[in-house]
């Protein structure tokens, strides 16, 4: 079995980080989790016990400069972990979860240990929304996937999250500079960052994020909720297969190492077999 680490950086985000530690700790072991709190004013929560969690100097004060600095920092940390004995490093935000389809009957570590990975491996991205009138406000005391059932197959979250060699991630982990990406079968990245209307509204009132210039970004990302409510939900297995093939073959003209999908807005309903994972 391969030795695998997962790393992330957060600021004022215990809601997601708690789930992140719970999930990746179960899949990889808490001793293989590396968490960096953006700012020395941040406190390490008790649920991080057993992980490698530390507060670091705050990286930047505006969203663009901060994001570039954040990914430079995390790329260097991933390279150090690989040099220090890890076979693979998973780099994701705290609201992102790399998941193996339960139909395979494998843990994340078992699945990735069986993969041949050159530089990186990508999971197919699924961006969750909220079906208004059917799905209520998200509750922290229940699995996310028992409360949310609809997601957009999106290129934005098909990220080269798993790396086997030192490399440089672009902003948001969306690409690896100078390298292609490879989308794995039956591997998904579930993004929950904008899956609850009330939480989005609360984020607009977060002065720390607004001061960094996140307001326009958050408004833009709330469109996933609009899409989930506007478009018919399609069959998960059939259309994720299509999405994987399409994103493998199609690239945007401005970035050959990012996936594209003709701006299609494909909503799928998540099968019940995923419900207890997160």
Image (cartoon, grey):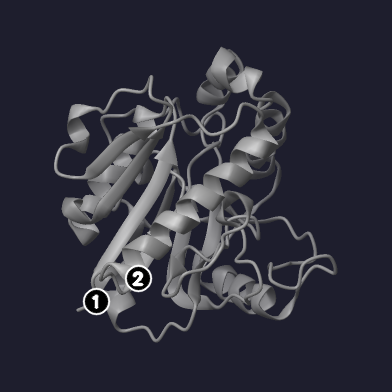
Residue in view at x 30 percent, y 36 percent: 54
Determine whether 48 is above or below 40 in the image. Answer: below
Is residue 46 toward the left or the right of residue 72 in the image?
A: left
Which residue is more in the foreground, 265 or 184? 184
**x%, y% of residue 90?**
39, 61
- Asked if residue 101 shows in the view, the reply is no
Outermost residue, bottom direction? Answer: 116
Which residue is more in the foreground, 190 or 32? 32
Mark 2, residues whose alpha carbon is within 10 Å: few (<14), some, or many (≥20)? many
Q: Secondary structure beneath disc 1?
A: loop
Residue carrying label 1: 2
Residue carrying label 2: 88
Outermost residue, right direction? Answer: 253
**x%, y% of residue 35?**
33, 43
Is residue 10 toward the left or the right of residue 24 in the image?
A: right
**x%, y% of residue 264?**
75, 60
Q: Which quadrant is the N terminus positioned in?
A: bottom left
Give residue 258's mark: none
Residue in view at x 38 percent, y 24 percent: 40
Give the mark nearest the N terminus, 1 or 2. 1
Is residue 146 toward the left or the right of residue 245 in the image?
A: left
Question: How far apart are the alpha carbons under marks 1 and 2?
Answer: 7 Å
Determine whether 144 is above or below 28 in the image. Answer: above
Asked if labels 2 and 1 touch by Cβ distance under 8 angstroms, the answer is yes
Is residue 76 toward the left or the right of residue 253 in the image?
A: left
Determine whether 250 is above or below 21 in the image. Answer: below
Determine whether 170 is above or below 183 in the image. Answer: above
Residue in view at x 20 percent, y 45 percent: 51
Residue 259 lies in quadrant: bottom right
Q: Secondary structure beneath disc 2?
A: strand
């Amino acid at each position: 079995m391969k030795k695998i680490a997962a790393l992330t950086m957060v600021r004022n985000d215990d809601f997601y980080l708690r789930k992140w530690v719970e999930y990746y700790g179960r899949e990889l072991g808490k001793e293989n989790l590396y968490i960096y709190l953006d700012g020395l004013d941040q406190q390490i929560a008790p649920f991080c016990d057993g992980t490698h969690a530390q507060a670091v100097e705050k990286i930047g004060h505006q969203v663009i400069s901060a994001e570039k600095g954040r990914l430079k920092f995390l790329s260097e940390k991933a390279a150090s972990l690989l040099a220090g004995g890890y076979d693979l490093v998973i780099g994701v935000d705290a609201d992102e979860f790399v998941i193996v389809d339960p139909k395979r009957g494998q843990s994340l570590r078992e699945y990735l240990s069986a993969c041949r990975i050159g530089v990186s491996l990508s999971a197919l991205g699924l961006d969750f929304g909220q079906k208004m009138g059917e799905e209520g406000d998200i509750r922290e005391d229940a699995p996310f996937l028992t409360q949310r059932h609809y997601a957009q197959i999106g290129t934005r979250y098909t990220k080269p999250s798993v790396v086997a060699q030192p490399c440089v991630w672009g902003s948001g982990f969306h690409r690896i500079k100078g390298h292609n990406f490879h989308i794995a079968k039956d591997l998904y990245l579930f993004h929950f960052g904008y899956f609850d209307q009330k939480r989005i509204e609360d984020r607009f009132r977060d002065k720390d994020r607004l001061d960094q210039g996140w307001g326009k970004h958050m408004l833009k990302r709330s469109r996933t909720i609009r899409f989930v409510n506007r478009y018919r939900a399609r069959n998960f297995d059939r259309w994720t297969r299509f999405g994987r093939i399409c994103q493998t073959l199609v690239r945007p003209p401005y970035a050959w190492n990012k996936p594209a999908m003709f701006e299609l807005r494909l909503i799928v309903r998540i099968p019940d077999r995923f419900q207890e994972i997160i």
